[in-house]
Image (cartoon, coloured by chain):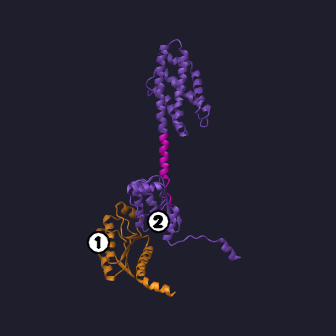
Chain colours: A purple, B orange
Amino acid sequence: MNTTAQVLEKNKERILEKWMQNQLSDASLRDDLMTSDELQHQSKEMLDGLLRAVSKGNYDNIYDTEFEQVTDTLRDISITRARQGFSPRETGAYVLSLKQAIMEVLIEQRKDDPATLYQEIMQLNNLLDNLSIVTFETFIKGREEVILRQTDEISEISTPVIRVWDGILALPIIGTLDSARTQVVMENLLQEIVNTGSNIAILDISGVPAVDSLVAQHLIKTVSATRLMGAECIISGIRAEIAQTIVHLGIDLSNIKTKASLASALQLAFSMTNLEVRRVDRNKGFKLTR
Amino acid sequence: MERIPVLKMGPFLLVTIQVDLYDRLALTLENDLINMVSQTGARGVLIDISAVSIVDSFMGRILGNIASMSRIMDAETVVVGMQPAVAITLVELGLTLQGVHTALNVEKGMELLNTKLGDNLELDDEEEEDQDDRND
């Protein structure tokens, strides 16, 4: 029964060669992310482990101890590839191209014995399919880790409160507003109002992708809290789609000052604080000095 | 019994709450304040709550009550110096203190009351001013 393993062991070099060929000939191979030496090394390690495991006669259960080394290596490779930004296709092709190489060699060796060949191919097929499932699982897990890390990073980026003018604060909100985020935004804004003694806060929501009733609720809360502190709040950056959703959802923003752009909100803030921006006629000044 | 002093400053009344309000104290304050408004004919009430760190729904209601009562007696109410945590709590409780004016600090509150009072006076004096303009 161990003959398959023996045949494979004997033709190890050829399998490796074919496998490398398959991998390198794949048009989607990312030689920018990995050198072929590295690939060769990885593949050799993997194949060694696989043959060692197969020599024990185990073709079915890849969770057995014999396969530990193989699955570990595979997991390592998938995780590294996920982090390096390989596509799922490239990672999957790694194991699947090994299958092809092994099949080719087996077919050559067993030309005269189709029955055994068939059985061997079935067994190896199963085995390698299982291995490729492990690869995918780990690859996706690796990707998910990346996504989780990024989510954390995004939420860590605090919403900055900018002092645009004496007594006027601006708060650009970028990304979706959920309860936790609103809390942070509100606290930051209110604290900054106390620190700077500002009268007016401009909430710019041009970076908020969508406004639903919950987000609107959060906005209204922030505005109310600002009012309680004794400052006025203007909401700016309301895009056409957002205006449409707000009206369709029947959200009442009538007692909140809203403006389409940050510029017009700033203008309103100026007029509320009795400020005026004027163009200086330079020519006139020049003539006067002359 | 402990009482919160109500100070008269010109046409306004000034209340500075330096202790955490418990219910009875808040009720006494409401009573005292409204009596003071009626006695002095004050035009504005300024309540400084910058030292208050804890509010509950009752406290919020008392503030709202004071404002409504004062308005009936022709006095505007301004609550000044609310802490951020207090503001967040009130909003979460659903109390937005409608009808109460707010300001960041006593100085700005006074300014606000003055402009409110000024607006009212202007309305009364509008005709006179028109005449002045013509004379100019």
**Residue under label 2:** A193
Label for residue B27? 1
Chain of the residue under label 1: B
SS at circle 2: helix
| Residue contact between numbered discs 2 and 1, judged by CB atoms under 8 Å | no
Q: Of circles 2 and 1, which is in front?
A: 2
The residue most toward the right is A290
The front one of B53 and A150 is A150
Q: Decide which of A251, A64 is in the foreground and name it.
A: A251
Residues at marks 2 and 1, CA–CA distance in whole angstroms: 30 Å
Residue A56 in sight: no
Q: What is the secondary structure assignment of the residue under circle 1?
A: helix
Majority secondary structure of magenta residues: helix
- Residue A166: % across, % down: 53, 68
- Crowd band around label 2 with a 10 angstrom C-alpha radius: few (<14), some (14–19), many (20+): many
The type of residue carrying mark 1 is: Leu
Q: Amino acid at mark 2?
A: Ile
Residue at the (55%, 39%) spot, across then down = A84
Location of the C terminus of chain A (image quadrant): bottom right
Which residue ends up furthest to the bottom in the rendered image? Answer: B135
Nearest the eye: B111 or A286 = A286
Most extreme residue toward the top is A112
The subunit carrying tag 2 is: A
Residue A165 lies, in percent from the top left, at: 53, 67
B35 sits to left or right of A70: left
Q: Position of residue A28 (x, y in %)?
A: 58, 33
* Part of the protein shown in magenta: A143-161
The image quadrant of residue B125 is: bottom left
Discs 2 and 1 carry the same chain letter: no
Residue B117: % across, % down:
41, 79
- Residue B49 image-quadrant placement: bottom left
